[in-house]
Image: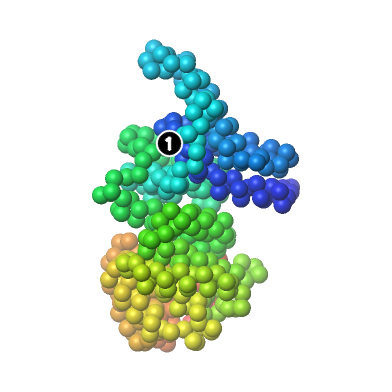
Amino acid sequence: MTSARPSQSERIVEDLLRDLAPQVLGALVRRFRQFDACEDAVQEALTAAAVQWPEDGIPANPRGWLVTVAARRMTDHVRSETARRRREDLDAAERPVDAVLAPAADEAWAAPAADDTLTLLFLCCHPTLSPPSQLALTLRAVGGLTTAEIAQAFLVPESTMAQRISRAKQHIKAAGATFEMPPADERDERLKVVLHVLYLMLNEGYTSTSGPDLQRADLSDEAVRLTRAVHRLLPDDGEVAGLLALMILTNARRDARTGPAGDLIPLAEQDRSLWDRDAIAEGVDLITHTLATARLGPYQVQAAIAAVHDEAATADETDWLQVLALYDVLGTVGPNPMVTLNHAVARAMVLGPDAGLELLATLDDDERVANHHRLHAVRAHLLEMAGDTEAARAGYLEAARRTASTPEQRYLEGRASRLKP
């Protein structure tokens, strides 16, 4: 039995709630300093709004409505905790709970704060958390996704994801983290973590690591939305702008990446008339301005590479010399195994497949990528370019065996089948 599609009013409400979720949570955490309980209260308020607003209409002040409802949930929570620990909490015993918590008693705390979303991102990306926990908590607290939606995105049971998010909250509490921007001497490093989490979100949405679908548009769109929010707060940060440009330019190709059956279509074979030209123009303008005004960083270079690809009318018109030059720069400012994989392809396109294979060989002993399917897939592609069809076929089949993505597996097996043994 299939569920009914959401109505237009329900979609409008859903989009609005996702925009407001981090603002409301930020207001509550800024006031009550209890991340775990505040997050639960906000989720209850969001659920109530999702039920009521499509029927009753969106209130004149939707943010205020959510803050008020969530604050009442917090009042109930603290009342319960106070009753249980009255003797342990002298402060709560000396003052009436309503006087401390009632939202109408002190409305200043509920007023929008420009940096609440960014502060919340810093909190969710606390360095004591593992990258998967940072990503899950960001999607829940800042993205407004439910635990079930996050679990579905990463193909794990809801109970498993709930435990992961719960442990992340406990780690933040144990670390003594507060709802404040990190000190100036820590801010740049913490911002790198925030941007990396958003980048991981984009990657998982662009090419899902496992499952039947190549792409998760909802994750990609959420990554863009959150990065736009960070860019509004930090408009002069070159890496924030670079990451946003990279996301926009990458997502512009989304409609052309899969066929009618969901099969993977590689960049060189895509119907470029399906690319979003308005998005490409936005991304190119953003990275062009950023490169001219900001200190160079890895996300900016990646965005510049994406712009070169997106501006080529056909695959044959791609300026591979420029792409190779940019990868030379990226290998210096932001080296990592995945950069080397793509760098090898660029070298092969300009200098020939042997040059690309030579660079790939440097990754054979790198534990971070030695067993990754992409290393085998890229090597197979370059071997095919070099005319070694037998080795290429074996490489494609090995890559297909190692990936958990069904569309990638089908694509790699198809490449292998075209190379007759």
Residue 185 as seen in the image, left or right of residue 74:
left
Q: Position of residue 38 (x, y in %)?
A: 48, 33
Q: Position of residue 204 (x, y in %)?
A: 48, 58
Report the number of numbered marks.
Answer: 1
Q: Nearer the viewer, residue 284 or 11?
A: 284
Q: Residue at x 42, y 47 (%)?
A: 115
Residue 57 as seen in the image, left or right of residue 238:
right
* 125 relative to 341, above or below: above
Q: As drawn, which residue projects farthest toward the left?
A: 185
Q: Does the image show residue 180? A: yes
Q: Position of residue 68 (x, y in %)?
A: 57, 32
Residue named by callout 1: 30
Q: Residue at x 71, y 48 (%)?
A: 9
Q: Amino acid at mark 1?
A: Arg
Residue 268 as seen in the image, left or right of residue 58:
left
Q: Which type of secondary structure does the marked residue at label 1 adopt?
A: helix
Q: Nearer the viewer, residue 337 or 145?
A: 145
* 280 relative to 35, above or below: below
Crowding near the residue tagged with mark 1, few <14, some 14–19, many ≥20 C-alpha atoms within 10 Å: many
Find residue 375 and report its image quarter.
bottom left
Q: Residue at x 51, y 25 (%)?
A: 105
Q: Nearer the viewer, residue 212 or 143?
A: 143
Residue 276 as seen in the image, left or right of residue 22:
right
Q: Position of residue 390 (x, y in %)?
A: 43, 81
Q: Residue at x 53, y 28 (%)?
A: 103
